[in-house]
Amino acid sequence: MSALLEFDGVCFSYGRKSDEAGFVCDLNFSIDKGEYVAIIGGNGAGKTTTSKLINGLLKPSEGRVTVDGLTTTDHAVSKLAKKVGMLFQDPDRQICKNTVREELAFGLEIRGLAADEIKSRVDEVVSDFGFAPGASPFTLSRGERQMLALASVVICDPEILVLDEPTTGLDYRECMHIMERTRVLNEKGTTVIMICHDMEVVLDFAERIIVMAQGRIIADGDSAGIFRDEDVMRKASVLPPMMIDLSLRLSERADLKDRFGGFSSVDELLEILAKSTSARARS
Amino acid sequence: MAGLLDYSAGTTILHRLHPLAKVFLALGICVAAFLCKNLIVLVCLLAFAISLGLIGGIYRKTAKLVLGLLGIAVFLFILQVLFIRSGTPVLLFITDNGLMTASFVVLRLMTATIPLALLLVLTQLNDLSNSLVKILHLPYRYAFTITTALRFIPVFTDEMSLIMESQTARGVNFDTKNPVRKIRLMIPLCVPLLVTSVGRIEQAAMAAEIRGFYLRTRSSGSKDYAFRPLDATVVAVVAALILVAVLL
Ligand SMILES: Nc1ncnc2c1ncn2[C@@H]1O[C@H](COP(=O)(O)OP(=O)(O)O)[C@@H](O)[C@H]1O
Ligand SMILES: [Mg+2]
């Protein structure tokens, strides 16, 4: 069985071919149904470009992107949008209706659903997210607007959800709110691809990380392993999450390496500490 | 479309011209285009306007500009030819009067638009507003308003394309070939455009105020704008152009 999303030798450039800037190339990866993947890398690494290649907003100049068997070059974005939902950084570019209810219904109307079907789905989402359906989107706070933008994407039930820096400008609570939503969706089977600058969030939510630098993929693998690769971290100009950083530094000391070389979360560290104190108490 | 009216840096003779001489040149060509009653002179004026772009060394932008205007021109031409009923028929329903009027309208449109667009591409907005303030004694707040409005055009076009991208990703079918349908789809997007733009403008106004907008006087600004013989030559040439346009 083939993967849900496949990048096969994909290259894309905004300007002339020879320009190094605005150039992504040699993108090869595939993502299966139900995965939760993070794309990380410094500014200008090509993450947003890659995300736009996923739903056909940009078409590859070389190679092929296939979404659930559809090659993006052969299909209109509006058709691919039924499979790929995309949440951008700025909710204000997306929200264009006068009430929360209309905004939520908009995506379904475009897809030509029947009125009663639309109504029942909107009602469901409104109670699920706890929105006030009659409110004007522009009276909501930034975090609530981002939540509304997310809701009006997921109401269409996309197979793949792409999030481009969904939590920039949100406070911790709002950020967690959005992220928990994506986790729930992922558990129900939605494939999530998230671009994120907050490595703590990435470690908490993503199982797999694709690291980009200068328009290329420089690493692709499970999160804990990627964050421990100092060479990759330096090339991507990101700092690993604090707990992994601590673990790496502790493991630089020969006497601590065995015990502290492998944790990647507070819970794991606590477990190690609990084990070693109880061992000492016994001896 | 984005970036077409942005400043292109350069050191050509047009770049070095006095900002007001450039304004005079651009407006002069516009005036000449509207006063001109001779088709051949009008074509020459258009050629002159386009050649300014080439002298300014902005070949690609000039080409894009001309092509873009050509699109509008063809549309206008067809409309005019279809609707003007006076004169003698030449072919089917097309009359000689229609052809003549349509040619004039289209040529005038292009001849008047191109120099104004080139003015923006070949002059730094700061130079433009400073010289308007210093030499023509235009109150700074008006000059600032004009230049800011112009500066925001590319910001708005970028913003609009980002909004359209965002909506396309939701499944709005902008890839449609039907222009009426496309415009119908775009109208609701004015809401997000307005919301983000008003926010931007408010920020810009605040930033200007914090930096002492009201302290500014006519003599503020570190550059002096002196007229040179070249500028006088340009003014003379423009005056001659207008004269030719009126007389021929
Ligand atoms: N619309 C565009 N036109 C030209 N160049 C662009 C455009 N968008 C992005 N770029 C360039 O492409 C490169 C990658 O950008 P992007 O994919 O947005 O990076 P990231 O999201 O990782 O910060 C950058 O060098 C950027 O300047
Ligand atoms: Mg980005």
Image (spheres, rainbow, N blue to C red):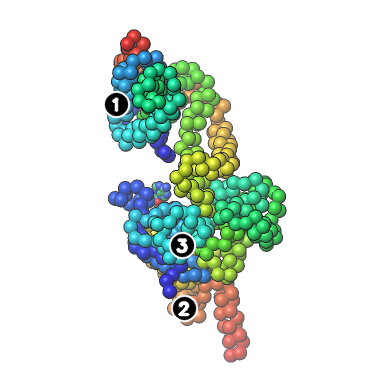
The residue that mark 3 highlights is A39
Residue placed at 52% from the left, 28% from the top? B145
Q: Quadrant of residue B198?
A: top right
Looking at the picture, does residue A131 appear above or below residue B38?
A: below
Report crowding for label 2: few under 14, some 14 to 19, many 20 or more residues within 10 A (C-alpha). some
Using the image, name the chain to which the residue with label 1 belongs: B
- Figure quadrant of the C terminus of chain A: bottom right
The residue that mark 2 highlights is A257
- Figure quadrant of the N terminus of chain A: bottom left
Looking at the picture, does residue A106 appear above or below residue B23?
A: below
Question: In the image, which is nearer the foreground, mark 3 or mark 2?
Answer: 3
Residue placed at 62% from the left, 51% from the top? A103
Q: Looking at the image, how many numbered discs can be counted on the residues?
A: 3
Residue B162 image offset from top left, x and y in percent: 49, 46
Residues A277 and A182: in front is A182
Residue placed at 50% from the left, 19% from the top? B138
SS for dot 1: helix
Residue B128 image offset from top left, x and y in percent: 43, 25
Looking at the picture, does residue A262 appear above or below residue A210?
A: below
Residues B85 and B5: in front is B85
Task: Answer with left or right where residue A16 lies relative to residue A30.
Answer: left
Q: Quadrant of residue B92?
A: top left
Question: In the image, which is nearer the foreground, mark 1 or mark 2?
Answer: 1
